[in-house]
Image: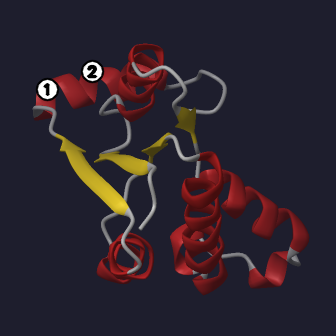
Amino acid sequence: MCNGKILWINGAYGAGKTSVVEVLHEMLPGSFIYDPENAGSFIRSNFPNSLWKDDYQDYPLWREINFKMILQLVRDVQQTILVPMTIVKPECYDEIIVLLRGVSVDVRHFILRVDENTLRERLLGLEGKPDS
């Protein structure tokens, strides 16, 4: 059994996952933010263009790396780990969240819901900005 826990914040792009995680990080002393997208950037930057996929989550290696990284973190840091990441594909959910729960990691999975108009406004507001 691990003493740490995972708060996985899921939701559509622009739903506010990162903002929610930043607020939680301030509210939970000793918490740690883990961004699974970094593994995707690493994979893509080390693969030839011919092997690139449109979505990081389509790399089985991405799912494996994130499962192992999160498991190692929860065992080593014994803190609450905050994860802002959209997961919609069942294989991603199964190969990360279900596997973590299977080895007694306390994973709390939350989905942010945003009404369509608010989401459209947020996404339109991001157009033309870096990293949008």
Using the image, determine if residue 103 lies above or below residue 30: below
Residue plotted at (46% across, 49% down): 4
For the N terminus, which image quadrant? bottom left
Q: Does residue 55 appear anywhere in the picture?
A: no
Q: Separation of disc 1 and disc 2 at Cα?
A: 6 Å
Using the image, determine if residue 126 lies above or below residue 111: above
Q: Does residue 10 appear anywhere in the picture?
A: yes
Q: Characterize the local packing of mark 1: few (<14), some (14-19) or many (20 or more) Cα atoms within 10 angstroms.
A: few
Residue plotted at (13% across, 34% down): 116
Compare residues 25 and 18 and report the one nearer the observer: 25
Using the image, determine if residue 51 lies above or below residue 57: below
Q: Mark 2 highlights which residue?
A: 121
Q: Mark 1 highlights which residue?
A: 117
User: Which amino acid does the dot numbered 1 rest on?
Assistant: Asn
For the C terminus, which image quadrant? top right
User: Which amino acid does the dot numbered 2 rest on?
Assistant: Glu
